[in-house]
Image (cartoon, rainbow, N blue to C red):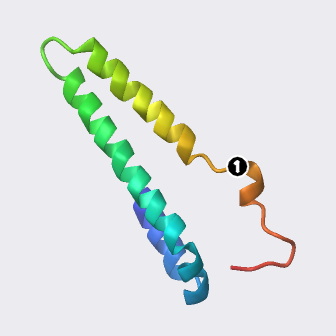
């Protein structure tokens, strides 16, 4: 779902803006892959007969850490008055 929203947003941008944002978008994609890998590993550990608590703790901490790194500062989301994409 979120991927579709991102694609729609990216496709609505002018080519110049898409080029400027390409590095950030690539980083976002990489961050999402890492997050999905940790979630998948966590799900796998939780569905075993005897969950590995250390592994669960490790992946849960990695998910929190990755999520924190992905947060954007409030000021970066504010555009200058009159500035359009």
Rendered position, 31 above or below 46: below
**Residue, x 41% and y 32% (percent of image)?**
62
The image quarter in which residue 82 lies: bottom right
Quadrant where the image shows the C terminus: bottom right
Quadrant where the image shows the N terminus: bottom left
Question: What residue occupies the far left of the structure in this picture?
Answer: 49
Find residue 7 and report its horizontal and vertical position in percent: 45, 71
Q: How many marks?
A: 1
Residue position marked by numbered label 1 in the rendering: 73
Q: Residues within 10 Å of mark 1 (few under 14, many from 20)?
A: few
Q: Secondary structure at mark 1?
A: loop
Find residue 6 and report its horizontal and vertical position in percent: 48, 66
**Residue, x 54% and y 47% (percent of image)?**
70
Rendered position, 18 above or below 77: below
Q: Is residue 3 left or right of residue 49?
A: right
Question: What residue occupies the far right of the structure in this picture?
Answer: 81
**Residue, x 25% and y 33% (percent of image)?**
41
- As rendered, which of 28 and 47 lies closer to the eye? 28
Find residue 61 and report its horizontal and vertical position in percent: 43, 26
Find residue 37 and report its horizontal and vertical position in percent: 29, 42
**Residue, x 55% and y 88% (percent of image)?**
15
């Amino acid at each position: 779902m979120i991927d579709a929203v991102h694609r729609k947003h990216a496709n609505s941008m002018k080519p110049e803006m898409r080029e400027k944002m390409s590095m950030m978008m690539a980083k976002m994609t990489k961050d999402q892959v890492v997050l999905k890998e940790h979630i998948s590993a966590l799900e796998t550990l939780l569905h075993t007969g005897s969950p590995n608590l250390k592994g669960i703790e490790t992946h849960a901490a990695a998910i929190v850490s990755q999520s924190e790194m992905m947060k954007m500062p409030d000021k970066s989301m504010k555009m200058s008055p009159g500035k359009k994409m």
